[in-house]
Image (spheres, rainbow, N blue to C red):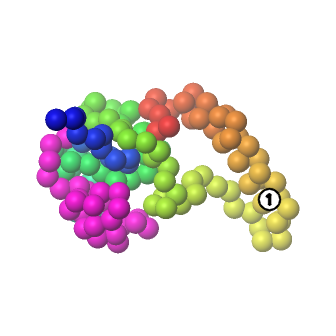
Amino acid sequence: PPPPPPPPPFFFPPPPRQRPTPPGPWGGLGDYHHVLPKAEAKPFSDLASAEGAVKRGEADYVFADGLGLALWVGGLEAGNCCALTGGDYLENRYFGEGIGLITRQEDAALSRALDDALQRVWDDGKYTELYLRFFPVSPF
């Protein structure tokens, strides 16, 4: 038989049990959603608790923002227990539009200029280059 398909984006495994989901805008997705249709959601009060459950083998995966997970996976606390797997860890349907800036309401022109500049930094690969310069594990 063919090998099983790779796991979907946003997850990293130890052995099968429950999938932790820390609180957030996607925390109310319940037991079924399109990313992990057969996952049993197990809510945690914070991301550190979910990461700890995966590290201890009490959960298979954690569904969370890839930038935060990359920092944990590459840090001492994870103890080389886990790895990022899948694709884009920046899915805006779950985690918002990413890093942003706030301007005063009357500074609409400045806001548009900053939006344009940030988009160009992303499009030309400079964001990834800067991220990798300062952080050890890439979510890209």
- Residue that appears at 81% across and 54% down: 113
Q: Position of residue 5 (x, y in %)?
A: 28, 41
Q: Quadrant of residue 12?
A: top left
* Residue 74 part of the magenta-drawn span: no
Disc 1 secondary structure class = helix
Q: Measured from the top left, where is residue 50 in percent x and y?
A: 27, 53
Of 10 and 51, nearer the camera is 10
Query: Which residue position holds label 1?
Result: 112
**Residues in magenta?**
14-41
* Quadrant location of the N terminus in the rendered image: top left
In magenta stretch: residue 37: yes
**In the image, is 34 to the left or to the right of 4?**
right
Q: Amino acid at mark 1?
A: Arg
In the picture shown, does residue 111 fall above or below 79? below
Q: Is residue 47 visible?
A: no
User: Image quadrant of residue 35?
Assistant: bottom left
> Can residue 140 be spotted in the picture?
yes
Residue 94 at x, y percent in the picture: 45, 61
